[in-house]
């Protein structure tokens, strides 16, 4: 194993044990699927436990209710002033949501009225420039639109560095939820998942990202850790997470639970791979023109890896229980 492979993982494990919380930027579409809600709730739980410091939440799509929904969740967890970045560039798409408006209208939030309106790239640059070198973890659970725009950005009042150099200087690790591994083989062109809605940005980030980039998979891997049965039993007038799951599961008609693809990415970003996840470190990701990915052993990229398999499949219920417990935690008084 090369030194380049060892250092980022060692840094991740060290940060999970040290006193200082891990600085995290969370990038989400918060529209088409409800696992984004669980992941953001879990991020707040990690922050309440002192494991992370949430720097910002970015929106990767154009649904007008995504940012207000995020603000309602942030407010519920008593972080009403967390900055929210709106999708940057011209590639962002709008997807419908079965829950975002319901949550935004049912719980307190002031995004439309008085929350700062800032594009994601500007917020990324401001947030990264203010942090120590090699300190920030980015977790994306939506389209890669903002990340590509960040890489393409130029110097501004926050930093004289271009986007790629700023990322290389400040980001320790980027965890990207997407897509299927070792390959996504759907021959259709529908814009599902996190890679297909904006395939140009997906390819650019995959090819140009200058620090360790860990991909986490979906499909049966994520379905094996599905959650929701306990969440929907919470009072939806008191829990925005419960309201979101009730609304999504009722309207999408996907069954009594939903996969935990986004929760897996967040857990890897905050706590690393141990003790549950296998890691493939040799090879690189290849993205085609419609956003399908395929992992190939050659060429080997030392800053690319993925996880899409459990070391022990019998651990899936334990991990699902952890995800559900974190998503159901009561907000901690500030």
Image: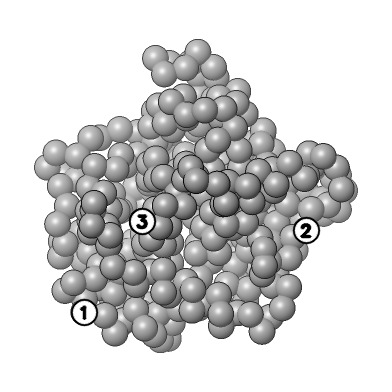
Which mark is in front, 3 or 2? 3
For label 2, the SS is: loop
Which mark is in front, 3 or 1? 3
Q: Which residue lies furthest to the front in this view?
A: 19
Question: In the image, which disc is placed on residue 235?
Answer: 1
Measured Cα–Cα span from mark 3 to mark 2: 32 Å
Which callout, 3 or 2, points at the residue further toward the start of the chain?
3
Question: In the image, which disc is placed on residue 163?
Answer: none
Is residue 290 placed above or below 253 in the rendered structure?
above
**Residue underneath mark 3:** 48
Q: In which quarter of the image is residue 183?
A: bottom right
Q: In this view, does 248 lie to the left or right of 225?
A: left
Which callout, 1 or 2, points at the residue further toward the start of the chain?
1
- Of 40 and 196, which appears nearest the observer? 40
The residue drawn where x is 59% and y is 67% is 218
Q: Quadrant of residue 303?
A: top right
Which callout, 3 or 1, points at the residue further toward the start of the chain?
3
- Of 35 and 45, which appears nearest the observer? 45
């Amino acid at each position: 194993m090369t030194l380049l492979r060892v250092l980022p993982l060692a840094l991740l494990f060290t940060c999970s044990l040290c006193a200082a919380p891990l600085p995290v930027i969370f990038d989400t579409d918060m529209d088409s699927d409800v696992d984004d809600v669980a992941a953001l709730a879990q991020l707040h739980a990690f922050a309440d436990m002192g494991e992370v410091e949430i720097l910002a939440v970015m929106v990767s799509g154009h649904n007008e209710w995504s940012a207000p929904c995020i603000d309602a969740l942030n407010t519920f967890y008593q972080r009403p002033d967390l900055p929210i970045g709106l999708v940057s560039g011209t590639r962002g798409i709008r997807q419908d949501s079965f829950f975002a408006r319901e949550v935004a209208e049912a719980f307190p939030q002031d995004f439309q009225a008085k929350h700062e309106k800032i594009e994601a790239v500007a917020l990324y640059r401001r947030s990264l420039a203010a942090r120590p070198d090699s300190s920030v973890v980015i977790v994306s659970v939506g389209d890669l639109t903002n990340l590509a725009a960040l890489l393409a950005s130029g110097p501004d009042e926050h930093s004289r560095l271009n986007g790629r150099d700023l990322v290389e200087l400040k980001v320790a690790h980027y965890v990207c939820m997407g897509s299927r591994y070792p390959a996504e083989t759907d021959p259709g062109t529908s814009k599902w998942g996190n890679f297909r809605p904006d395939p140009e940005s997906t390819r650019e980030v995959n090819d140009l990202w200058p620090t360790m980039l860990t991909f986490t998979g979906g499909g049966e891997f994520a379905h094996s850790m599905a959650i929701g049965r306990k969440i929907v039993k919470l009072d939806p007038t008191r829990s925005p997470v419960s309201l979101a799951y009730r609304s999504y599961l009722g309207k999408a008609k996907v069954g009594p639970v939903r996969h935990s693809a986004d929760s897996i990415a967040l857990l890897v970003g905050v706590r690393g791979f141990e003790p549950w996840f296998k890691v493939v470190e040799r090879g690189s990701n290849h993205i085609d023109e419609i956003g399908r990915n395929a992992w190939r052993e050659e060429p080997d990229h030392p800053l690319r890896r993925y996880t899409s398999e459990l070391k022990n499949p019998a651990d899936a219920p334990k991990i699902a229980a952890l995800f559900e417990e974190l998503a159901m935690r009561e907000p901690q008084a500030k």
